[in-house]
Amino acid sequence: MTTPNSRRRSEQGSATIWSLSILLLISAATGWALLWLTAESARHSTDRAADSAALAAASAALHNLVMQADSNPCAAAKTAAIRSNADLVGCGCEPLDCTVTVRRVFPLLGPIQASSRAGPVGEAGGDDEP
């Protein structure tokens, strides 16, 4: 038979263990949430860099068409990508429909790549109206 004193003695420190366990669980959840938010932010940032580069390429392609100029759409895309701290991985323009791919490297996350298209509405990008 256990006495009240021996029972209290065996449970001494259990509140400390439970408190530390809960604190560790909360810390781990917070760490994972911060890592996830960082990854999402990096992905969105790379998407914005790709959008910016695609718009620059399409603008240069339009300038070529309207002004009969000889500017290089992919050079414009590369300049826009560099401004966004990204590397231009791929670029292609068919008259006014430009598609670019950029990559950014983030600490802890590594490289993240994104593609974007800019061009007239109703072209091959799925913008057709029924």
Image (spheres, helix red, strand yellow):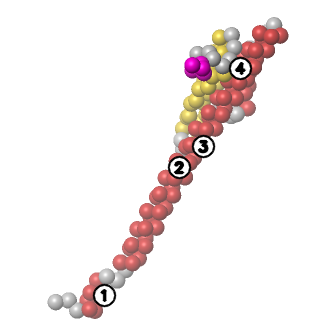
Q: Residue furthest left?
A: 1
Label 2–label 1 contact, CB within 8 A: no
Q: Residues within 10 Å of mark 4 (few under 14, many from 20)?
A: many
Q: Position of residue 120 (x, y in %)?
A: 68, 17
- Residue at (76%, 17%) from the top-left corner? 60
Query: Which mark is first along the chain, 2 or 3?
Result: 2
Residue depth check, mark 3 versus mark 2: number of the one nearer the observer? 3
Q: Quadrant of the C terminus?
A: top right
- Count the marks: 4
Disc assigned to residue 57: 4
The rendered magenta stretch, by its main secondary structure, is classed as loop
Query: Which mark is first along the chain, 3 or 4?
Result: 3
Query: Which mark is first along the chain, 4 or 1?
Result: 1
Residue 39, by quadrant, is top right
- Residue at (63%, 17%) from the top-left corner? 122
| Horizontal arrangement in the rendering, residue 96 relative to residue 71 (left or right) | left
Residue 115, by quadrant, is top right
Q: Amino acid at mark 2?
A: Leu
Q: Residues within 10 Å of mark 1 (few under 14, many from 20)?
A: few
Residue under label 2: 35
Residue under label 3: 41
Q: Residue furthest top?
A: 68
Q: Residue furthest right?
A: 67
Q: Amino acid at mark 3?
A: Ser
Q: Amino acid at mark 4?
A: Ala
Residue 82 versus residue 18: which sits nearer the camera? 18
Q: Which residues are magenta?
A: 126-130
Spatial distance from mark 3 to mark 1, Cα to Cα? 51 Å
Spatial distance from mark 2 to mark 1, Cα to Cα? 42 Å
Label 3–label 2 contact, CB within 8 A: no
Identify whether 112 is placed above or below 22. Answer: above
Check disc 3 and report its element: helix, strand or loop: helix
